[in-house]
Amino acid sequence: MSARVVQDAAVRWISGAWEHPGMDASVSIPGPRILFLGIPFDHAVSHRPGTRFGPAAILNALDGFSLYCTDKRTDLGRLRLCRGGEIDVSNDIHATYRHIADTVAGLPGEDTPVFLGGDHSITDPILRGLLRRHSRRTLGLIVFDAHFDSRIPVPGKEHSGHWMHTVAEVFDHRHTVQLGIDAPIYSRDYMDGAEAAGIMVRTPWDIRRTGLQATVDAAIRHAVEPTGAVHVSIDIDCLSAGFAPGTSVPNAAGLMLWDVADALFEIARRAPQASLDIVEVSPPLDGSGITAQSAAHLVMNFLAGRAARLPPP
């Protein structure tokens, strides 16, 4: 159970707003439904495991938040928030990926899905499922990550660092954006290969030099405007380690939490259709719980962006 820092009867809390599958429709509020699904899978984590505990920790942090995004001055009370449970996973990596893709493909078309991981390898089957779900639409992709995740996989040694490469079998990266790439473990070939594939890559230095708003505008032009539908994938290691110590590979020189939150709000507000995954939150590596709190703040900003799209009541 989440620990609220205040007890205030005048405040509506996320913990009291959840719908659940099978709930009587007559007690649901009208409006768009945000469907939360946990994917507690970390058998492909590239370094230190523990992300299987990420979904529960993020939801627990969210339960301590109110239904008002103070920072964006936006009420979330008109959104239908639904806990859809967890997608079943196993230690069979490829069977798990197939099950994730099939589950995502079968989600109700009118829902906005939010996936909580889990290691970053799950974004490959999520995207495959979304492509089937949006079979008549092109899908854009905006990734916040310190890593390219485009290494060539070695059979039997699959990990979360090559999903951008494997998903290219079915996904057109000409409408893909990668923001925050700065891990010092690559050669120039990775940068050149990404940009040759049509990916818009911006490092933290690029973002600081150009400005956040200009970067977000360019990302939306690249991934959202040509498609009308975008999936946003956030690897928590895109953040500076002070905001996200609890992850497999903490990033000493990452992005600021408020910059990612503001960018996510703008993308969610301006995209006609959007979905989200947040991955690589590893509670066992963070006794303070700040990493899950950071992830919850990012989720709240995504929700605020979707709420800001609604017409006035």
Image (spheres, rainbow, N blue to C red):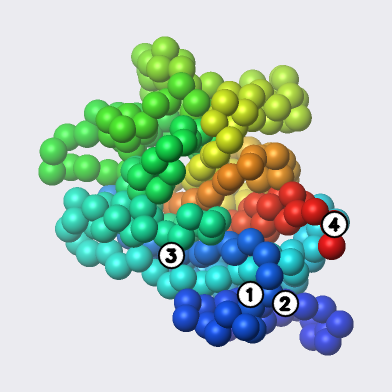
162 left or right of 251? left
- SS for dot 4: loop
Label 1 vs 3, first from the N-terminus: 3
Most foreground residue, 118 or 238: 118
The residue that mark 3 highlights is: 38
Disc assigned to residue 312: 4
Q: Is residue 25 above or below residue 282?
A: below
Residue lying at 62% horizontally and 28% vertically, measured from the top left: 225
Q: Is residue 11 left or right of residue 176?
A: right
Label disc, if present, on residue 63 of the rendered structure: 1
Q: Is 88 placed left or right of 11 in the picture?
A: left
Residue at mark 2: 13
Given residues 31 and 220, the one toward you in this image is 31
Which amino acid lies under the numbered mark 1 shown in the image of this protein? Asp
Q: Is residue 290 visible?
A: no
Q: Residues within 10 Å of mark 3 (few under 14, many from 20)?
A: many
